[in-house]
Image (spheres, rainbow, N blue to C red):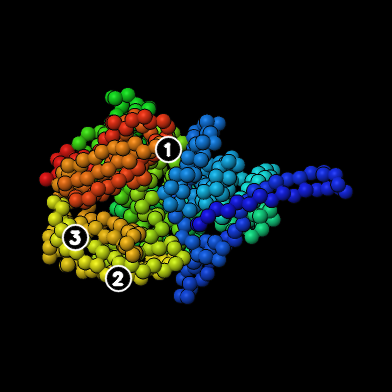
Amino acid sequence: LGEQNIYTFTGSLLTGNTLLDSRMVSTGLRDIKLIQKTDPDGKGESFYFQLNGVPVFMKGANYIPNDAFLPRVTNERYEDVVKRAADANMNMLRVWGGGIYENDVFYDLCDKYGILLWHDFMFACSMYPGDNEFLENVRNEAVQNVMRLRNHPSIALWCGNNEIETAWRNWGWQNLYNEQQKKEIWKAYDTLFHKLLPSVVNEYAPGMPYWWSSPTQGLNVTDYNRPYRELYSGDVHMWSVWHGKQPFSLYEKYIGRFMSEYGFQSFPEMKTIESFTLPEDRDITSEVLNWHQRSGPGNMLIKTYLDMYYKPALNFEHFLYLNQVLQAEGVSLAMEAHRRAMPWCMGSLFWQINDCWQAPSWSSTDYFGRWKALHYYARKAYKPLLISPEVKNDSLFIYMVSDSLNDQHGVLRFALYNFDGNLLLKREKEADIPGNTSTVVWVEPIQTFTQLGKLQDVFLYLEFVAGKTQEAERYFYFDAPKNLNLAIPAIKYRVQKKGKVYEITLSTDKPARDVYLNSVSCDGWFDDNYFDMLPGRDYRITFYPKNDCSRLDDLRVVSLAGSYVNQGK
């Protein structure tokens, strides 16, 4: 979103030369609109944010309270989570309606780091009363918070609630009531979310977008029985993957105008697991790990999906590695599909960035702020310039997705390797990348690759170079990880301390996939992790310790082929 210019304004009230009162306010200046225009065919309408006159694709995640015990959340923890969003190339967080109206410092930090906020009012997953006393209470709370937050440039939209409309229409709630009761309940809903709350926003933050519920297709939708009508307007919560047990490939087909919720669970890393378990608890069927699972059969659901895409893990610690890679691969597939679909789709907010306790969950960073594989994948999938291949109709379509407002010219190259590291094919072409859109820049028949080897034995390395600068790169695999004939790489590394950070230089003799670096003794984050490697080159990774870390002599390096019971060739 560019530089975050924050200005300080001072207002003074005087009588003659006597100062009666003064107030200082720091804020940013911006114009934001929610654009909903009817499509030419009349079947739907757009849903995107226009910032200072420019359509912006929103890249981000949902945000929940940082702790089950709110007083434990320090200013440092607030800054950590907001900075994590910015470091992952996000520009929006959705403050979930099942959480809280946050402390002022959270909004100040979002202003500082350029994170826009889709902000739910605090109503979620339940029908609410409609009596005058309750509505007056709600109005007072809404007025207080809208007034408190209206000068924050990070506030992009107020939303009435989380999932109440869709629950009422689709979750069978109406079956619990007779016709008269249903009318009374819906009247209360209509009064609160279609009248009271939008009137508060209009009165106390005029011009601020208001959205009725998340998800909804708006107030004018009548064709509720039209197949996939939810994809044509409004926002979408997509849970056919995970709750519906559908394959990850559905993410590439089920794409609405703004994807405000979707996700997949994983366990945190071993250090976090150790903080609440004994050695005998470290099994997904144990009583402790089942009690920490708050999504029904979630532990076994992770195992079910893991068996779909990966080979069996070597041990429990490698299971933790694999389940994080599983989450990252699945959710990033959705992120990329959403970005490729712009301008049809103009937002992708996965569930969720943070955690309120140590547990398996949908988060991309755990309770202690440790980055899971998903957060590293998001950092790549949300980069300003993205190479995103997709196989369809027996061809490989190579998309380039750009957030830049300027067109770019350069050379797109791809190279086909086998898993021994031998180069089989190399091609390149000049490409023009239009700004702020998604474009197919190359279509290659799959037969080009199958003539040179089985798809389970080969992979692509792609890069886009402008002048002498590599602007984007990508590794692409043609089949599920468990079907790939990976070789076990011998990865060498050396560590050098440079001031307060560490530089790690790695090399490999064979192509390596999802290379994971971790230190048992030092907490912090790497500028890249869960990355792929080619032989014949050095990879330099910077580690940023969270606290003082005098040495990094316990670095552990894991790759996909070495994490299986029956390891690679």
Could you tell me which quadrant the C terminus lies in?
Answer: top left
The residue labelled by disc 3 is 416
Q: Position of residue 294 (x, y in %)?
A: 40, 37
**Residue 425 vertical position relative to residue 137 in the rendered view, above or below:** below
Q: Residue at x 41, y 58 (%)?
A: 384
Mark 1 and mark 3 lie on one chain; the one further toward the N terminus is 1
**Front in this rendered view, residue 380 or 8:** 8
**Front in this rendered view, residue 309 or 564:** 564
The residue labelled by disc 2 is 430
Tell me, yes or no, if residue 372 can be seen here.
no
Mark 2 and mark 3 lie on one chain; the one further toward the N terminus is 3
Q: Amino acid at mark 2?
A: Glu
Q: Residue at x 64, y 60 (%)?
A: 207
> Which residue is farthest right?
16
The residue labelled by disc 1 is 369
**Front in this rendered view, residue 440 or 421:** 421
Disc 1 secondary structure class: loop
Q: Residue at x 52, y 48 (%)?
A: 113
Q: Residues within 10 Å of mark 2 (few under 14, many from 20)?
A: some
Q: Amino acid at mark 1?
A: Gly
Please tell me how many numbered marks the rendered image carries: 3
Q: Residues within 10 Å of mark 3 (few under 14, many from 20)?
A: many
Q: Residues within 10 Å of mark 1 (few under 14, many from 20)?
A: many
The span from disc 1 to disc 3 (Cα, nearest Å) is 37 Å
Left or right, 489 with reference to 261 = left
Q: Quadrant of residue 563?
A: top left
Numbered tag placed on residue 315 in the rendering: none
Q: Position of residue 556 (x, y in %)?
A: 26, 35
The span from disc 2 to disc 3 (Cα, nearest Å) is 18 Å
Disc 2 secondary structure class: strand
Left or right, 492 with reference to 549 = left
Mark 1 and mark 2 lie on one chain; the one further toward the N terminus is 1
